[in-house]
Each structure stands twice: as structure tokens, then as C-alpha cells.
Amino acid sequence: METIVLLVAFLIVLSSSLILKIIYKIFSKKDNINNVSGYEAAKKILKDNDLEEIKVGKIGGELSDYYSNGEKQIMLSTDIYDDKSIASVAVAAHECGHAIQYKNNYFPIKLRNRIVPFVNFGNTVGYIVIMISLATSLSKLFMLGIILISFAILFQLITLPIEINASKRGKKELLRLNIIEKEEVPGVKIMLLSAGFTYLAGLLSSILQIIRLIYIFQNRRRD
């Protein structure tokens, strides 16, 4: 049972990553009709939303894109930054969606930022507590450990709708500013949906890991 749960968690994460890479490869080879690069799309969206103070930079790697509110910058991976594909404008718009969330004081993203210290503490201390509980078979100590590491699941639960919302905002801006045409919307949706699936996969994997720990603890107590 323990091995099966671990394998399922691994396969969920692996499959989501593979799906995203396959979808990205498909739409990174399809140029958008208006010949707009990821960088140009990001700059246009930011300018129209009065967010010109946010810089758009380039970073190495594949799909390593992110938005940093503290640094007020969007970092786009090299291909996303330079290419004029459907994938490029979709990813760039998604990151702009996060910038717009902060501007509009989107509550879920504020809530997620507030629980980060608890998540970090829970991940650091929680597994230590669980290891001690497994050695001593103390159920109360084990439950404390589970509660501590569950902050990470709460973080992922909040992150999922944040990512979905950022994608919706980004897609809306792409259409509103005529960066993409209506016939390109399905491609943008598929690209963003596959990216969002990786967050869902991460959440499911974390839940399965907790189930695995509970199974291990119960077996230790029986022994």
C-alpha cells in the first residue's frame, strides 16, 4: 500500500509535467497571427493597466517564468521572451495576470503571502516531529506533525485558484488588447490549462504523501 501511494503520487506529478511540456512544444511552434512576442505582450498589458513600473526581464531555463511583486518585475524564460508564438503570449499574459492581482488587492494572493511563514515552519519542523512520533509511536505527536506539514497543502489549495484567476485575467487582456485573435483563444486556453494542471498535480501528490505517512504510522503502532 505504501509503495502504491508513493508511485501514484510520483506518476501524477510526472504526467502533469510531461503534458505541459508536450502542449508547450506544440504551441511554441505556432506563431500568433499578430506577430507579437512574449516580451511585447507583457509590456502592452502592463502599460494598459498602469503597471509600467514593472520591468520585464529574461531568465534562463524552460518555462521558468515568474512574477516577483517585491522586485516589481516579470521574468520570462528566453523562448517565451523572444518568440512570437501562442505559447509565448499565453505565458507572458499569465504572469501579467499576477501583477494585476496585486494591483487590485486580490484577497487570495494576500492570504497566501500571509501564511508563507507558517508553511516554512511547518515543513521544517513537521517532518522532524513525524520522524520522532514514528520512533516513539506517540499518536498526539504524530498528529501535531501532520498538522504542521498540512500548512503546505493549505498553501497549495490557495495557490490553485490564484493561478486559475491569473490565467483568466491574462487571456482576457490578450483578447481585449487585440494581441491574439478569437481563433487563437482555444490554443491559449489549452496552454494555460496544462500549466494549471501542474499545480493540481502538486496538491494531489501532497495529499497522497500525508495518506502514506498515516498508513506508515498505523502500521508501526500495530507492530
Image: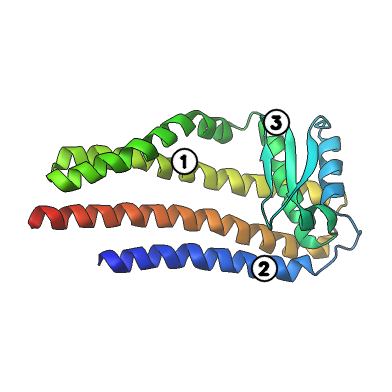
Q: Residues within 10 Å of mark 3 (few under 14, many from 20)?
A: few
Looking at numbered disc 2 in the image, what kind of residue is underneath it? Ile
Looking at numbered disc 1 in the image, what kind of residue is underneath it? Phe
Question: Residue 215, percent across and down?
Answer: 22, 57
The picture quadrant where one finds residue 87 is bottom right
The local secondary structure at tag 1 comes to: helix
Q: Residue at x 74, y 41 (%)?
A: 74
Colouring rule applied to residues: rainbow
Q: Residues within 10 Å of mark 1 (few under 14, many from 20)?
A: some
- Give the distance between the C-alpha atoms of the residues marked 3 and 2, in whole angstroms: 30 Å
Name the image quarter holding the N terminus.
bottom left
Looking at numbered disc 3 in the image, what kind of residue is underneath it? Glu
Q: Going by the image, does 157 lie left or right of 25?
A: left
Q: Residue at x 80, y 50 (%)?
A: 174
The picture quadrant where one finds residue 124 is top left
Return the residue nearer the eye: 177 or 152. 152
Classify 39 as above or below 13.
above
The local secondary structure at tag 3 comes to: loop
Marked residue nearer the N-terminal end (1 or 3) = 3
Residue tagged by mark 1? Answer: 155
Name the image quarter holding the C terminus.
bottom left
- Give the distance between the C-alpha atoms of the residues marked 2 and 1, in whole angstroms: 26 Å
**Which of the labelled discs sits on residue 71, or is there none?**
3
Residue tagged by mark 2? Answer: 23
**Which of the labelled discs sits on residue 93, or is there none?**
none
Question: Residue 115, percent across and down?
Answer: 46, 31
